Amino acid sequence: MARVYSNRLSEYTHENGGRVAILFLLFALAIYQFIHAGFNAFAVICLSPLAVLFFYVAFKWKMAIFWTLIVVNWFVMNRNIFLPFPTSLADESLELLLIAMAIIDVRYSPHFGRAINVMFLAIMIWCGLCILEIINDTCGLGLNFNAWFTGFRFLALHLVWIILVFSLYISDPKSLNIYLKLWAALSLFSAFYTWKMINIGLTHTEYAWLHSGTNRTHLLNAGTLIRYWSTFNDAASYGCNASASAVAFLIFGITSKIKYERIFYLLTAAIVVWGMFQSGTRTAMITLIAGFVVYLFLARSVKILVPSAIIGGILLFILMFTNIGNGNQQIRRMRSAFKAKEDASANVRDINKAAIAKYMKEAPWGIGIGMMSKDIPANNKFKKLSDIPPDSEYVYIWVRTGPIGVTVFTCCMVMMLLGGCIIVLFRLKSRSMIGIGGGLCAAFVSIQLGGYANQILYLYPNGVTFFGGMAIVYLLPYIEPEWIKYEENRLAKIEEKKRLRLEKKLASRV
């Protein structure tokens, strides 16, 4: 019996010797680390096979990692999620992994050339300005490389990773269709979570944050009005995201040729707009309108322009000149967006901008990328600049890079948008493709306006969602020929199902 067991063991070891040896060495290393370095090192060694499994899955199913990136971006700033590392690490590590996998399999990933376009050029111009900022010593404190690199990653490198990843992985009609539906599904979940916060209640973490004293902007009217933030880090980010997303879904719904998708996107747009109202973000109303106006220009369709203009005009008239819906606090708050001169918080922002403008006269290049309040001594005359709340992504960039930097940034954003609009107007032929491109351009305009009024442009998931969306616009001319065939096949299958159902119905009557 012992001999039989020994033979079986030797046979198994002969067939699986490498794996057995590795597992034995890992076990020995784990025990050694537990004895000499403690439980943390022991846990790292024990979890290392999971890392191997992750990389195996990553290379076997690359698109799974891309979809993971989209989902992680959506939830990484949720206030119920605590990460033992910076939130940017979760995003950047997945993006760099996706790029590395594409480089390794470069023979099977021939899409690097698609990333070289007007948007990439605009990003490179902005990166160049940010690199120059490394020698910016406006504060007279010497060069602070660590602060600069932190800001450079946030403001510039993030955009490079986004355009590369989307150019590499949104490469065919199927991946594009799945991406748009995943975006819609995540937006619907955020709307559902808003409903949950209103009707079921906040979690202990959310309640503690709301009443922590640092979030006076979310608990208004003596505590009778809550600005809900759903799965985001604050209400402004949620409201602007919902506004820009709703614009895109509305346009996808109007232009889709597939009936059930048309219904799906239109319902999604309506539900997401409801969530937008619950955020109490007044800027969202303006961005919603502006985004749709951009699409009406890009649509080149009188059939869409006339009814949309009439319906939009009626809704705008109701909001601006009537009191309909004033019984709802959130609607009253959103309506106040059209009365900015009477709004106290808007006046405070104007006062802050006026104070910043005085200091910026002596800082044409700003105080430096990445320079925060903790990096500037109290006796430094530019300390005040780092302490004044920017309240806006553009003001934040203005303070860090000066009038020169914010001008370059604005020109680069306009350059990206104009390049995308030219593609939609002159290079796309399919109505549904024009709808996708127009919807993504409109969403980009919406989130840029949101970034002009709130510091939300780079926050997760806004950066990946809307800069990634603009990257997709530049990919549409490559995808369109396959998309037309893909759409025709889907329509043909739908018609075939209808025909079979009709035949079955007629046969049952005989």
Image: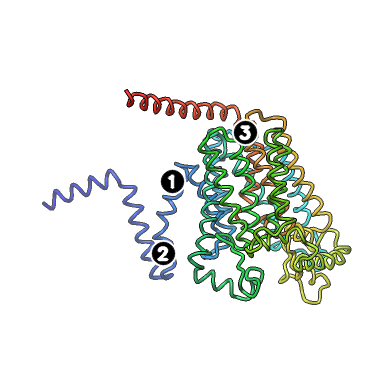
What's the amino acid at mark 3?
A: Met
Q: Is mark 2 on a helix, strand or loop?
A: helix
Q: In this view, does 449 lie above or below 417?
A: below
Q: Where is residue 298 in the image (x, y as percent from the top left)?
A: 71, 37
Amino acid tagged 1: Tyr
Mark 2 in CB contact with mark 3 (< 8 angstroms): no
Foreground of the two, 169 or 70: 70
- Above or below, comparing residue 130 to residue 259 in the picture: below
Q: Earlier in the sequence, mark 2 or mark 1?
A: 2
Q: Which of marks 3 and 1 is nearer the N terminus?
A: 1
**In this rendering, would 58 be left or right of 219?**
left
Residue 449 image offset from top left, x and y in percent: 73, 52
Q: How far apart are marks 3 and 1 (CA)?
A: 35 Å
State how far apart marks 2 and 1 are (Cα): 21 Å
Secondary element under disc 3, as helix, strand or loop, is: helix
Q: Earlier in the sequence, mark 2 or mark 3?
A: 2
Q: What's the image's color scheme?
A: rainbow
- Secondary structure of the residue carrying tag 1 is helix
Mark closer to the observer (3, 1) = 3
Q: Name the residue under label 2.
A: 43
Q: Is residue 318 visible?
A: yes
What is the x, y in percent for residue 307? 68, 39
Instruction: Give the residue number, with chain letter if any, for mark 3.
Output: 433
Disc sitting over residue 56 in the figure: 1
